[in-house]
Amino acid sequence: GNSVTQMEGPVTLSEEAFLTINCTYTATGYPSLFWYVQYPGEGLQLLLKATKADDKGSNKGFEATYRKETTSFHLEKGSVQVSDSAVYFCALSDTGGYQKVTFGTGTKLQVIP
Amino acid sequence: DGGITQSPKYLFRKEGQNVTLSCEQNLNHDAMYWYRQDPGQGLRLIYYSQIVNDFQKGDIAEGYSVSREKKESFPLTVTSAQKNPTAFYLCASSTGQGYYQETQYFGPGTRLLVL
């Protein structure tokens, strides 16, 4: 079956530091890959996505590149802000009929001033 | 503004009681989903519906029931058979066109606590 593995948190960074959150996946087909973000007490919202190998998704300074050879989709940001503090979920959606999404366990990011 | 609303924000359940969580969307989406979120476990799919009057069990459907009588509404009932209902429940929707690139849009969630 499909699975998504994320680095365990929490990740604590100082403001303006570089962020990497690792994500690797296992899938039977050619999945689409997503990063969702969850702010405290809220639902998830899409941060970025990539639908095929070598695609780069980007939004709000965050980037992730779909690497089929390493089955990875690592999230990066060059300079984090306090407002980036949230839980980040990596997810995949596989081909073939109904769109079932498999989520990782989430990585909590805390940015301190 | 289009979006998904969930109510209530907090819900308390007594032993042996059924409770119903509301989910409404005005995005004109065909597909709707219910997830359960527990600390350290990510999101797990309870039920999903691709069209009105049809729904399917997800990975952890035992102790839950749903209905889909209207396109915009997908209520979830947590029955007394669910022995560990304390969790954060998230409702989501997508266009339901069957494309695996679809984004899911989430509501703000309902936190269910057992008294």
Image (spheres, rainbow, N blue to C red):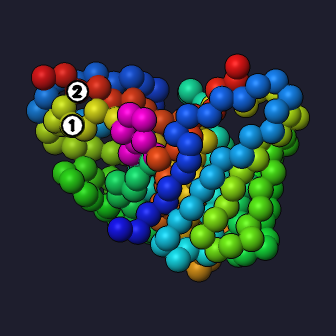
Q: Quadrant of residue A13?
A: top left
Question: Going from the N terminus, do you reach mark 2 or mark 1 first?
Answer: 1
Q: Is residue B101 left or right of residue A109?
A: right
Q: Chain of mark 2?
A: A
Q: Quadrant of residue B2?
A: bottom left
Circles 2 and 1: CB distance less than 8 Å? yes
Q: Is residue B25 left or right of residue B30?
A: left
Q: Residue at x 56, y 43 (%)?
A: B8
Comparing A94 with A48, the one in front is A48
Amino acid marked by disc 1: Ser
**Is residue A38 in the magenta section?**
yes
Q: Which mark is residue A83?
A: 1
Q: How far from the left and from the top, in percent, is residue B72?
A: 60, 70
Q: Dot 2 surroundings within 10 Å: few (below 14), some, or many (20 or more)?
A: some
Amino acid marked by disc 2: Val
Which residue corresponds to mark 2?
Answer: A111
Q: Residue at x 42, y 24 (%)?
A: A9
Q: Which residues are magenta?
A: A37-43
